[in-house]
Image (tube, rainbow, N blue to C red):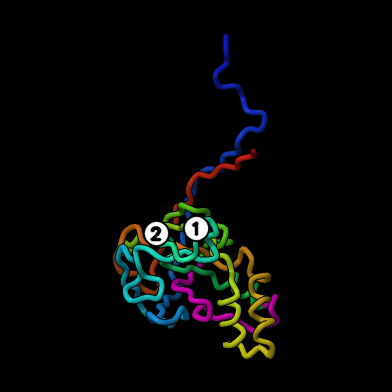
Amino acid sequence: MLDLFPEAEKPVEIVPAKKLSARAAALYVALADHFQTRPVEELRLGFDGISGDFHAGATRRSGGREPWYPRGTEMRNERQLSIVAADELAIVAGRMGLPEIKPEWIGANLVIEGVPQLSMLPAGTLLFFKDGVTLKVDAQNGPCRISGRSIAENAGMADIEAGALLFPKMAKRLRGVVAWVEKPGTIRAGEEISARVPEQWIYQA
């Protein structure tokens, strides 16, 4: 009898879904004309993202992160919020020889505590905030020279260009994640978060 579904030579490894508990340690918003952020006590979120924020909008223009589109192509905005972890920023700062890297220097909107290796959260992770907001993680946030330049300038590095180039190397897989608003509302500093990490699979072609 013909076997229509033969066993794969390399079985797919399934990693079960899991739940994590976390906290919104700090919140930030960017003015509409610049990506650097400033601390606030709450974030008001709609389906377009943070009201008045630099990265707000249902759509955005493609850039260097999307080489499959001509630069400037209008596309869905899956980068409405930038989420980072203080412990990861401390690692990057140490690698760069700096005492600290402040979240606002790199345009972070949210600092989360309680999630180990935050930058490794997979796409599709849901962040349920106690007061009703839900954010959906889209992807890891790749470090860029623009953020590196901001760090170099704010930290007073002697060689700004060297600092700009150093950050992408030192912050790989430590830059946090980007997310978009699945369920709007208001996030407040100190709010509890329940994270649902989806089932994952390791595909070997």
Instruction: Indicate the quadrant containing the C terminus: top left, top right, bottom left or bottom right.
Output: top right
Label 1 sits on a secondary structure element that is loop
Q: Provide the residue span drawn in magenta.
A: 94-113
Residue 42 percent location from the top left of the image: 34, 76
- Image position of 53 (left or right of 89): left
Question: Which amino acid, mark 1?
Answer: Tyr
Q: Helix, strand or loop at disc 2?
A: strand
The percent position of residue 99, horizontal first and vertical second, equals 64, 84
Give the residue drawn at x 63%, y 28%: 8
Where is residue 6 drawn, in percent x and y? 60, 21
Which label belongs to residue 167? none
Q: Earlier in the sequence, mark 1 or mark 2?
A: 1
Q: Is residue 3 above or below residue 159?
A: above
* Residue lying farthest to the front in this orientation: 70
* Residue 101 falls inside the magenta stretch: yes
Q: Is residue 53 above or below residue 121?
A: below
Residue on which disc 1 sits: 69
Q: Nearer the viewer, residue 95 or 192?
A: 95
**In the rendered image, which quarter is residue 92 located in?**
bottom right
